[in-house]
Image (tube, grey):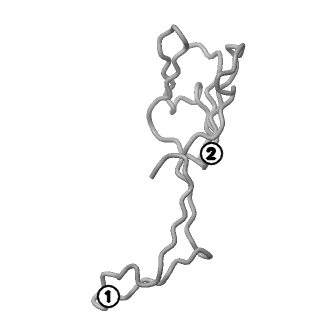
Amino acid sequence: FLPCQQYLIVYAAKSFLDTSANRNYVGALPSTASHLFWTSCITAYSPAKHSLDNLISTNIVLTFAEEVTLGTGSIVLTPLGESPMNFDITDGTRVQFNTPTTSQITILGDVPT
């Protein structure tokens, strides 16, 4: 699946057989009862992409198309002309999630490393 895309799943009756000895057909999934979903992506940034004159204390907020849960890893920010800054997503002093699920993640601005 492609990131940040909406998908609709519909299939006709008899598209699938179950694996029982009877090999029953699976009923249709028509558009009126379809499965609709989005693949995860960032839909909004704050501050806005390519904006200027943001204070060092400005929080960075990432908004996703759907709720996301806390995993492991880092968010890497690279200020122009400087070394990359790693933000461990499990470090609640630097990265905030509304637990257990959220569609927004905040990287706190002006926090000493």
The x, y position of residue 93, in whole percent, is 59, 25
* SS under mark 2: strand
State which quarter of the image contains the C terminus: top right
| Residue at horizontal 46 percent and vertical 84 percent from the top | 13
Frontmost residue, 5 versus 98? 5
* SS under mark 1: loop
Q: Is residue 2 above or below residue 74?
A: below
User: Is 111 positioned to the left or the right of 89 in the image?
Assistant: right
| Residue at horizontal 27 percent and vertical 89 percent from the top | 21
Structural distance between the alpha carbons of marks 1 and 2: 41 Å
Q: What residue is shown with label 2? A: 102
The x, y position of residue 32, in whole percent, is 62, 76
Along the polypeptide, which appears first: circle 1 or circle 2? Answer: 1
Amino acid at the residue labelled 2: Thr
Q: Which mark is residue 66?
A: none
Q: Is residue 33 above or below residue 94?
A: below
Instruction: Check disc 2: other Cα within 10 Å, few if <14, some if 14-19, many if 20+.
Output: some
Name the image quarter holding residue 8. bottom right
Q: What residue is shown with label 1? A: 23
